[in-house]
Structures are given as structure tokens and as C-alpha cells.
Image (cartoon, helix red, strand yellow):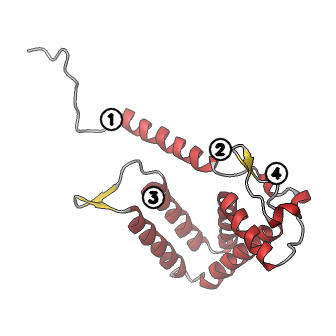
């Protein structure tokens, strides 16, 4: 009996399946990093000045955090990583949790299924967030982690409030991102 014209099926994943998974993971990482804005635009010193008032500062923070969110996340993670260099166990937990985040949240193509039940992305987000915080706090680097997160938040807020928004460009519409009180500064 011949199998000509039939599609072979196999229940075991061969090497091509793992290569395909790695290439999909690589593409998803590139897409995620593609949301990162150019560092040159983030650190454009000609765009730094004091906001005129509190409402302008709040508008700048909202706009800049939305526009540079990937860059700001990378800055906060770098500050956290650098603070954990003197706590190797915490650093290992941090790296392990980052791997869990990558595989369970960022690099998934299909919904997560546990015991034949589909788990919502929000549940995965909350569980991973809580586990990350709990595991890092159990490593006796609580003060170090909280201080580094506070420093990261201050760095982001200071930059976001002092960075003008009139030169931010929206690639999709081809127009400036904002036209308001901060664009006249």
C-alpha cells in the first residue's frame, strides 16, 4: 500500500520544529525591540527644557512614557540588573524569571493551556508579576530591589517631564505626535 498524496503526520517534534520555534522567537524579539525608539531621539539634548507649569509636565510625562515605553522599560531593567550584580542569587532569580517571562508571555504564539484549560493573558501577566516580585524579595535583596526600582522610576519621570514632545514623530500617520502646550516651548 502506498502513501502517495498523503500528508505525513508525526506526533514527535523533530529538529525542524525546534528550529522553527527559535526562528519565531527571534522574530518576536525583533518585533518587540522594533517598538524601541532610537536612543539618539531619546537623548536629544536640544529637546530638554523645563516645563512651563505642572499640567505641561504631566502632559509631557504621559506623551513621553507612551512614546518611549520600551526604552524606559530597558532603562529600568538595566538599573535593576546593575543593582543585582552584588547579589548573585538575586541576579540568577532575575535571569530565570526573565526567561519565564520570555517563554510564557512574550514569545508565545498560541494561548497558554494548562490541564486542557486556556489561561487568559491577563492571568499569566498577574501570576508572572507576582512570582517575580515574591522570588526576588525572598532573596534578601528587598531594599536593593526597591531602591533600584525607585531610582529607575525617578530617572524615567525626570526625563519624561523635561523632554519636549514637539519633535516626536508618529511613523504610521506621518505627522507630529502632539500639538499642544508643550510643542510651543
On the picture, is 94 further left or further right than 167? left
Residue matched to label 2 = 172
Relative to residue 6, is residue 70 depicted above or below? below
For marks 3 and 4, the one nearer the N-term is 4
For marks 3 and 1, the one nearer the N-term is 1
Relative to residue 36, is residue 64 depicted above or below? below
Helix, strand or loop status at disc 2: loop
Residue 2: percent from left, percent from top: 12, 14
The residue sitting at 82% across, 65% down in the picture is: 182
Q: Residues within 10 Å of mark 2 (few under 14, many from 20)?
A: few
Relative to residue 167, is residue 171 depicted above or below? above
The residue sitting at 66% across, 62% down in the picture is: 66
Residue 63: percent from left, percent from top: 71, 64
The residue sitting at 47% across, 51% down in the picture is: 107
Question: In the rendering, which numbered label is found on residue 14?
Answer: 1
On the picture, is 39 further left or further right than 6? right
Question: In the rendering, which numbered label is found on residue 93?
Answer: none
Distance CA(mark 3)–CA(mark 4): 29 Å
Residue 28: percent from left, percent from top: 52, 45
Q: Nearer the viewer, mark 2 or mark 4?
A: 2
Question: In the rendering, which numbered label is found on residue 40?
Answer: 4
Amino acid at each position: 500500500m502506498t502513501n502517495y498524496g498523503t500528508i505525513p503526520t508525526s506526533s514527535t517534534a523533530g529538529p525542524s520544529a525546534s528550529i522553527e520555534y527559535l526562528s519565531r522567537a527571534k522574530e518576536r524579539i525583533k518585533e518587540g525591540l522594533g517598538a524601541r525608539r532610537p536612543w539618539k531621539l531619546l537623548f536629544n539634548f536640544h529637546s530638554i527644557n523645563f516645563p512651563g507649569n505642572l499640567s505641561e509636565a504631566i502632559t509631557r510625562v504621559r506623551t513621553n512614557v507612551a512614546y518611549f515605553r520600551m526604552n524606559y522599560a530597558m532603562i529600568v531593567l538595566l538599573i535593576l540588573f546593575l543593582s543585582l550584580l552584588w547579589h548573585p542569587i538575586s541576579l540568577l532569580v532575575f535571569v530565570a524569571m526573565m526567561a519565564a517571562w520570555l517563554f510564557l508571555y512574550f514569545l508565545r504564539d498560541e494561548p497558554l493551556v494548562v490541564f486542557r484549560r486556556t489561561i487568559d493573558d491577563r492571568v499569566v501577566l498577574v501570576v508572572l508579576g507576582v512570582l517575580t516580585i515574591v522570588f526576588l524579595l525572598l532573596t534578601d535583596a528587598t531594599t536593593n530591589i526597591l531602591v533600584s526600582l525607585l531610582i529607575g522610576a525617578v530617572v524615567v519621570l525626570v526625563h519624561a517631564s523635561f523632554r519636549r514632545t514637539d519633535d516626536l514623530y508618529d511613523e504610521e500617520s506621518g505627522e507630529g505626535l502632539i500639538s499642544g502646550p508643550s510643542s510651543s516651548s
